[in-house]
Image (cartoon, coloured by chain):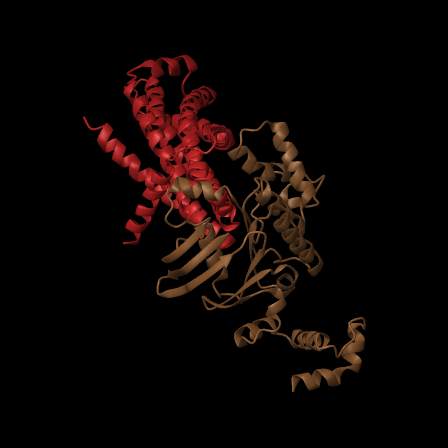
Chain colours: A brown, B red
């Protein structure tokens, strides 16, 4: 579990994170959502120690990460895996060498044992047989999966994913989202995902934190978010008319006015009156 | 004011390099890789420059020594001392500042921009130790070796040029080489080589490590790294000459 208390981060005169407190449970996908510039990336970088906050506490197993000495921080970092927005794979290394890198650095296992572990995690992310390929030869989705494999190879307790779906098509995004969710449940780790993709929110958002202008504006689950009364959150998630209509559909479904088995086209064509009623 | 800020950050980078390696074997591997990149990678250009540097030096010295009173073997002495004292350490290091410096700055800059350095930090690796220290150590090992090679090739270049142009027969060149040889000149040249090796590896490492932005900034930092390294080499050259050659 990660607990954040009254976190504050400023750059010059500008406050990026303002008094954010949140608890992130293990075995759950904790999503930080918000529009660009809302402070979610800075928040995540503070959590992993790439930025030093100006005030507040970040508790990993009830120990304040900010107050730890270099050695203690190193120990915590060994339990952290992170998937970066651009995957951050080492260009000059093959997939196998990329994934094996943390094992080479932090274990004294034999090469055979390390290779076995690398193949295990590559199989886990459905990349068996890609060992000898270089990052330049991989698609965006494959790079993300290698990034996930590298992040989990040391069996971390915490997994951080920064915009895991950026630059991916919807289908590949779904694959990555499901993979993150499965790994979270399988390894019982605390996963923190930074995203503004609403599909991800609905797919894997066990616990969602909505940030707006550096403040925690809303907190809840993917089941609650769609019915939230928070204006700023609604403005963010229902930015398009389509999503607004989709929400109306969902509400009608929930209230039993629409048969769940009917397809979307039927609903859009024939039940416009329901939607209009609901809007008014 | 900005100079002092940057100099302070540079010193912090140097200080930050000295920490216990997470895995000595991996650091050794990286060190050997850098030795190969910096040393062997620059060998070709050093060989070409050194040979022609010595050859041109011999021809131009002969052109200027028109007095019949001065023996022709003096040409060899001048070529030897010029190559050892200045050409091999300074000129070669200025060229290496371009070759090695831009490579180090762009490699680290690219790693910074593509978040590879962040990825290493999050793994719990001291990136200053893992990425910068092996480069500086490799430069300190290989660049003085390249300077020694440059000295030999420069002197040999002078011999070949003298012989081919008919200015100075090889036996006379060899006699001149042994006349009035001051071994301290080699010590001085090596002091310069070590100093320049440190400068042309650490300054680009600083600029590459602290890149902010995208590919445009990588290019800019790479250019800046080379320019600052060259200026630092010339400044250090003067400082060392003033300190170590002052009778």
Q: Residue at x 38, y 37 (%)?
A: B17
**Along the line of sight, which residue is nearer the eye, B149 or A279?**
A279
Q: Nearer the viewer, residue A154 or B183?
A: A154
Q: Does residue A258 sit above or below B10 in this rendering?
A: below
* Residue B219: image location, x then y, percent: 48, 50
Quadrant of the drawing holding the C terminus of chain B: top left
Residue A67 visible at all: yes
* Position of A245 relative to B185 (above/below): below
- In this picture, residue B43 sits left or right of residue A9: right
Q: Is residue B48 visible?
A: no
Q: Position of residue B181 (x, y in %)?
A: 30, 17
Percent position of residue A95, x then y: 63, 40
The answer to whether A245 is drawn above or below residue B118 in the figure is below
Residue furthest left as drawn: B247
What residue do we see at 28% from left, 49% from top? B4
Closer-to-camera residue (B171/A1): A1
Label count reads: 0
Q: Position of residue B67 (x, y in %)?
A: 29, 23
Between B222 and A36, the one nearer to me in the picture: A36
């Amino acid at each position: 579990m990660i607990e954040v208390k009254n976190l504050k981060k400023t750059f010059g005169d500008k406050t990026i994170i303002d008094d954010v407190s949140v608890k992130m449970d293990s075995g759950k996908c904790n999503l930080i959502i918000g529009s660009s510039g809302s402070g979610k990336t800075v928040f995540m970088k503070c959590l992993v120690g790439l930025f030093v906050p100006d005030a507040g506490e970040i508790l990993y197993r009830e120990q304040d990460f900010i107050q730890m000495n270099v050695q203690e921080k190193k120990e915590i970092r060994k339990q952290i895996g992170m998937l970066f927005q651009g995957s951050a794979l080492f260009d000059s290394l093959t997939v196998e060498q990329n994934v094996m890198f943390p094992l080479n650095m932090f274990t004294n296992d034999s090469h055979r044992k390390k290779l076995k572990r690398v193949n295990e995690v590559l199989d886990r992310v459905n990349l068996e047989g890609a060992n000898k390929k270089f990052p330049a030869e991989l698609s965006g989705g494959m790079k993300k999966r290698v990034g996930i494999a590298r992040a989990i190879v040391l069996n971390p307790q915490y997994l951080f994913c920064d915009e895991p779906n950026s630059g991916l098509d919807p289908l590949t995004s779904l694959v990555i989202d499901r993979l993150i969710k499965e790994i979270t449940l399988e390894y019982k780790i605390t996963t923190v995902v930074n995203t503004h993709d609403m599909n991800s929110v609905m797919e894997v958002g066990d616990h969602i934190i909505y940030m707006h202008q550096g403040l925690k504006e809303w907190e809840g689950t993917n089941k609650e978010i769609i019915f939230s009364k928070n204006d700023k959150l609604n403005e963010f998630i229902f930015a398009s008319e389509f999503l607004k209509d989709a929400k109306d559909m969902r509400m009608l479904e929930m209230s039993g006015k629409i048969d769940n088995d009917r397809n979307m086209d039927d609903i859009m064509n024939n039940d416009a009156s329901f939607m209009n009623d609901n809007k008014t | 004011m900005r100079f002092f800020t940057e100099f302070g950050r540079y010193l912090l980078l140097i200080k930050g390099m000295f920490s216990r390696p997470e895995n000595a074997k991996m650091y050794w591997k990286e060190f050997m890789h850098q030795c190969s990149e910096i040393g062997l990678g620059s060998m070709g250009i050093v060989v070409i420059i050194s040979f022609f540097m010595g050859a041109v030096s011999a021809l131009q010295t002969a052109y200027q020594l028109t007095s019949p009173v001065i023996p022709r073997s003096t040409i060899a002495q001048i070529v030897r001392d010029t190559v050892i004292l200045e050409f091999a350490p300074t000129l070669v290091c200025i060229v290496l500042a371009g070759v090695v410096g831009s490579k180090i700055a762009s490699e680290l800059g690219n790693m910074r921009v593509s978040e590879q350095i962040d990825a290493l930090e999050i793994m719990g690796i001291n990136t200053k130790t893992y990425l910068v220290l092996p480069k500086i150590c490799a430069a300190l090992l290989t660049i003085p070796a390249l300077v020694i090679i440059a000295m030999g090739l420069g002197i040999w270049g002078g011999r070949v040029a003298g012989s081919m142009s008919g200015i100075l027969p090889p036996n006379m060149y060899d006699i001149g080489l042994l006349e009035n040889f001051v071994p301290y000149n080699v010590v001085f040249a090596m002091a310069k080589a070590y100093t320049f090796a440190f400068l042309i590896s650490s300054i680009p490492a600083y600029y590459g490590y602290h890149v902010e932005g995208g590919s445009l900034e990588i290019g800019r930092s790479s250019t800046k790294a080379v320019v600052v390294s060259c200026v630092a080499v010339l400044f250090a050259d003067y400082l060392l000459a003033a300190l170590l050659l002052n009778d």
